[in-house]
Image: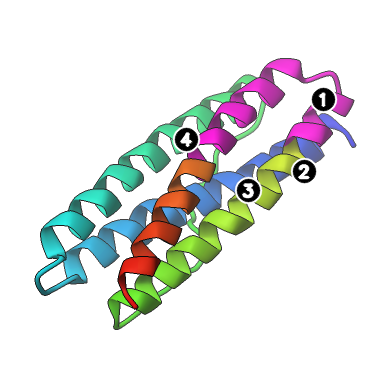
């Protein structure tokens, strides 16, 4: 692995954060019904966390000599609350897997600061996944 490859992988992660921001906000706008206030607020709060992650990744990419992507991964459009939360949880689980791998890759390259930044992001993503799991339990 070289610096360019790590930058490419960080851009892949950044694209996932951009997807999450847009997708979670879109889902928050579409929610209707009695649970709307709670679900809207949770999704909006998580999307703000994702914005922080995107900024941290973009700044790290630039510091490493790269150019941050502006293209999100595909947005998942869902019609029901359960489908929205399921799609959002799937994204968080993918992020957890990818970030765990990215930490190892960064450490192997001696990019300890990058690994620590990603570790902090991973902790937030775990909290997000836990929230989605709990919200999905309420949908049954």
Quadrant where the image shows the N terminus: top right
120 w.r.t. 110: above or below: below
Asked if the residue under mark 2 is in contact with the one under mark 4, i.e. CB atoms within 8 Å, the reply is no
Residue at 77% in and 20% down: 111
Q: Of marks 1 and 2, which one's residue comes earlier in the chain?
A: 2
- Residue position marked by numbered label 1 in the rendering: 107
Q: Of marks 4 and 3, which one's residue comes earlier in the chain?
A: 4
Asked if the residue under mark 2 is in contact with the one under mark 1, i.e. CB atoms within 8 Å, the reply is no
Q: CA distance from mark 1 to mark 4?
A: 19 Å
Magenta-highlighted residues: 103-125
Asked which secondary structure carries label 1, the reply is helix
Q: Residues within 10 Å of mark 4 (few under 14, many from 20)?
A: many
Q: Quadrant of residue 19?
A: bottom left
Magenta-highlighted stretch: main secondary structure?
Answer: helix
Q: CA distance from mark 4 to mark 3?
A: 13 Å
Q: Residues within 10 Å of mark 1 (few under 14, many from 20)?
A: some
Front label number (4 vs 3):
3
Question: As drawn, is 53 to the left or to the right of 67?
Answer: left
Is residue 75 among the parts visible in the rendering? no
Q: Of marks 4 and 2, which one's residue comes earlier in the chain?
A: 4
Q: Quadrant of residue 10?
A: top right
- Residue position marked by numbered label 2 in the rendering: 101
Asked if the residue under mark 4 is in contact with the one under mark 1, i.e. CB atoms within 8 Å, the reply is no
Q: Which mark is residue 96?
A: 3
Q: CA distance from mark 3 to mark 1?
A: 17 Å
- Residue position marked by numbered label 4 in the rendering: 53
Question: As drawn, is 30 to the left or to the right of 72?
Answer: left
Q: Is residue 37 magenta?
A: no
Is residue 103 among the parts visible in the rendering? yes
């Amino acid at each position: 692995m070289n610096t360019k490859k790590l930058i490419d992988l960080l851009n892949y992660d950044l694209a996932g954060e951009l997807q999450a921001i847009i997708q979670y906000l879109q889902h928050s706008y579409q929610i209707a019904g009695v649970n709307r206030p709670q679900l809207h607020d949770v999704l909006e709060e998580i999307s703000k966390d994702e914005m922080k992650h995107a900024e941290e990744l973009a700044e790290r990419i630039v510091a490493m000599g790269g150019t941050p992507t502006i293209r999100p991964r595909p947005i998942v459009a869902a019609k029901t609350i359960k489908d929205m939360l399921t799609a959002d949880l799937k994204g968080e689980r993918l992020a957890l897997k990818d970030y765990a791998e990215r930490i190892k890759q960064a450490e192997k390259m001696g990019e300890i600061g990058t690994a620590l930044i990603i570790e902090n992001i991973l902790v937030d993503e775990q909290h997000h996944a836990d929230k989605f799991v709990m919200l999905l339990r309420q949908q049954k």
